[in-house]
Image (cartoon, helix red, strand yellow):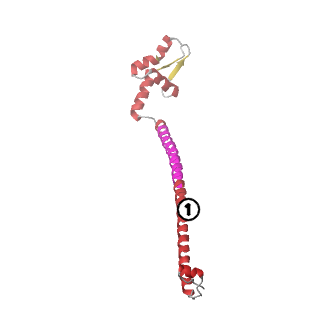
Amino acid sequence: MTQDEQKKEGFITLKEASERFGYAPDYIGQLIRKGKIEGKQVYANVAWMTTPEAIEEYLSKEKRTGKSEKDKQKFTRERVEQTLFIDRAGSRIVSIMLYAVISLLVVTFLTVFYFLSIANDHRLEERAKARLEEVSLQNSIQETTLIPSALNSSERLFGYAPFTI
């Protein structure tokens, strides 16, 4: 297809379309490849060509509806997936950190409880020993009687009589 034939059919190059409508040639080519604008690929130049009517139709359609329904759905779906993916990754990190903090608290609590119980057990054992000594001393005082015995040499030296049971 020569340039004269192209002009007869109403086709314009992407550069001409960009100058006419204010969009970049790459963007217009992208719209043609996506099928949103009617266009042809010219094999002599390996370039795309389109008609001004096709671009005007696309622009009027875009102004009427904004974005097409498929584009809106795709955008919404991508946005939701993106949000959920970030939320999932964030929730995984938070849950792992929460498990770590809870585990650390449990280990700390059990360690403190262990050492406090050992200290308390030692304290109770000391009290029990002291009470046992006190009770045994009281019992020995109550059960013992003073029996005077013959003074031997040690009694004479120290001046007291030993207790006997």
Q: Under tag 1, what secondary structure?
A: helix
User: At 39% across and 32% down in the image, what residue appears?
Assistant: 63
**Picture coordinates of residue 149 (x, y %)?**
59, 87
Identify the residue under disc 1. 114
**Picture coordinates of residue 156 (x, y %)?**
56, 82
In this view of the protein, which residue sits in the foreground, 3 or 22?
22
Q: Amino acid at mark 1?
A: Tyr
In this view of the protein, which residue sits in the foreground, 82 or 7?
82
Q: In which image quadrant can residue 67 be found?
A: top left
Task: Indicate whether residue 81 is drawn in magenta.
Answer: yes
In this view of the protein, which residue sits in the foreground, 78 or 59?
78
**Picture coordinates of residue 161 (x, y %)?**
55, 84
Residue 64 lies, with reference to residue 161, above or below; the image says: above
Task: Indicate whether residue 142 is drawn in magenta.
Answer: no
Q: In which image quadrant can residue 56 be found?
A: top left
Dot 1: few (<14), some (14–19), or many (≥20) neighbours within 10 Å? few
Residue 144 lies, with reference to residue 40, above or below; the image says: below
Q: Main secondary structure of the magenta part?
A: helix
**Picture coordinates of residue 72 (x, y %)?**
46, 38
